[in-house]
Each structure stands twice: as C-alpha cells, then as structure tokens.
C-alpha cells in the first residue's frame, strides 16, 4: 500500500482501533462499517440495488479486485460529508514510510505528545521485498496530579 497511497514511501499510515473509532462516530453520524469484498469481476449494479441500501453500498464502495485482497481493508462509509470528530483514544499507531523526512516525523511525534501512540518506521527486510515496521518511539499519556484545588500539574 505504501507505493500506492503514501507518495512513494514519503508519507505515513495511521492505525486506528476500529471499534473505538466506530463507537465514537455512532453517536453523531450515520456510519456503515464495511469489510471490503474482493472479487474477480466488478459488481453489476441494477435498478433493484438502488432500493437495497446495504447491497448498493457494498457494490459501489465495498468491492475491489481480487488482486488487492492482501490489503484486508475495512472502510467506514459516512452519510454526511462534513468534518468528522473522533475519539482521540482510537488512534493507536503511526507508520512512517521508508523515505519520510525525519523532520516531518518529529513534528508528528511532538504534535501527538501526551497520548498513548506508538510510532514505527518501515524498513526493508533483508534479501526481500517485504517491509517490516520497527518501533522508533512511544508517546505515553501523562496523568494529571492535583497539587492544589485550583492548580493542575502534569506529571511526565
């Protein structure tokens, strides 16, 4: 997926806890969780599909070529196009591409301080085309200690 979606390994991928992500959306948005179906032939959409919302969504947005099956993709399909807020605890990990600039990596790591997030850098496996994630940093949530009734202090 790196070569297709992450600007030739210069970008990053985000890992979410899909249950927390979907639960945070259920309260404010109409969202459909869809596991992608991989087929040898594209789906045929007929008039009957227009009246079958779930079947229509799967055919339109939830079907990909069998050659993409290794992605094991899950999509969240929303009924609205406005900006979405999500449970910040749904964000689990960030995976930096092979060629991502270290300065940009540090900006992301620092921007997500005080949250339980793991950061990985993708590397090529020796004598292989496979990529493997290497843990490079882990941010931790800091607890707040109340030292006085009107003052809060972060513990690092």
Image (tube, rainbow, N blue to C red):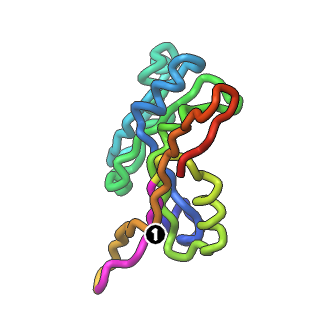
In this picture, is 124 found above or below 110? below
Q: Is 58 left, or right, of 9 in this rendering? A: left
Residue 124, horizontal then vertical, whole percent:
38, 78
Kindly identify the residue that appears in the image at 33 percent across and 48 percent down: 40
Residue 92, horizontal then vertical, whole percent:
45, 47
Kindly identify the residue that appears in the image at 45 percent across and 43 percent down: 16
Kindly identify the residue that appears in the image at 38 percent across and 40 percent down: 36
What is the quadrant of residue 8 in the picture? bottom right
In the rendered image, the quadrant that contains the N terminus is bottom left
Residue 114, horizontal then vertical, whole percent:
56, 48
In this picture, is 137 found above or below 87? below
What is the quadrant of residue 130 in the picture? bottom left
**Which one is nearer the viewer's eye here, 50 or 99?**
99
| SS of the residue under disc 1 | strand
Magenta stretch prevailing secondary structure: strand
Residue that carries the numbered disc 1 in the rendered image: 121
**Which one is nearer the viewer's eye here, 117 or 144?**
144
In this picture, is 119 found above or below 60? below
Kindly identify the residue that appears in the image at 49 percent across and 43 percent down: 91
**Which one is nearer the viewer's eye here, 108 or 140?**
140
What is the quadrant of residue 38 in the picture? top left
In this picture, is 45 found above or below 135? above
Start-end of magenta stretch: 118-126
Residue 53, horizontal then vertical, whole percent:
48, 18
Q: Is 88 contained in the magenta span?
A: no
């Amino acid at each position: 997926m790196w070569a297709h979606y992450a600007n030739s390994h210069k970008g990053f991928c985000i890992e979410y806890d899909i249950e927390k992500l979907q639960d945070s959306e259920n309260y404010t948005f109409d969202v459909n969780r869809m596991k992608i179906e991989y087929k040898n032939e594209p789906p045929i959409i007929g008039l009957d599909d227009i009246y079958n919302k779930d079947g229509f969504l799967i055919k339109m947005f939830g079907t990909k070529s069998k050659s993409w099956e290794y992605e094991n993709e899950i999509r969240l399909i929303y009924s609205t196009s406005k900006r979405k807020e999500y449970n910040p605890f749904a964000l689990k990990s960030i995976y930096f591409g092979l060629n991502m600039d270290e300065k940009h990596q540090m900006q992301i790591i620092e921007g997500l301080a005080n949250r339980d997030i793991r950061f990985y850098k993708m590397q090529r496996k020796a004598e292989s085309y496979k990529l493997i994630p290497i843990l490079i940093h882990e941010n931790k949530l800091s607890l707040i200690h109340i030292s006085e009734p009107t003052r809060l202090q972060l513990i690092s």
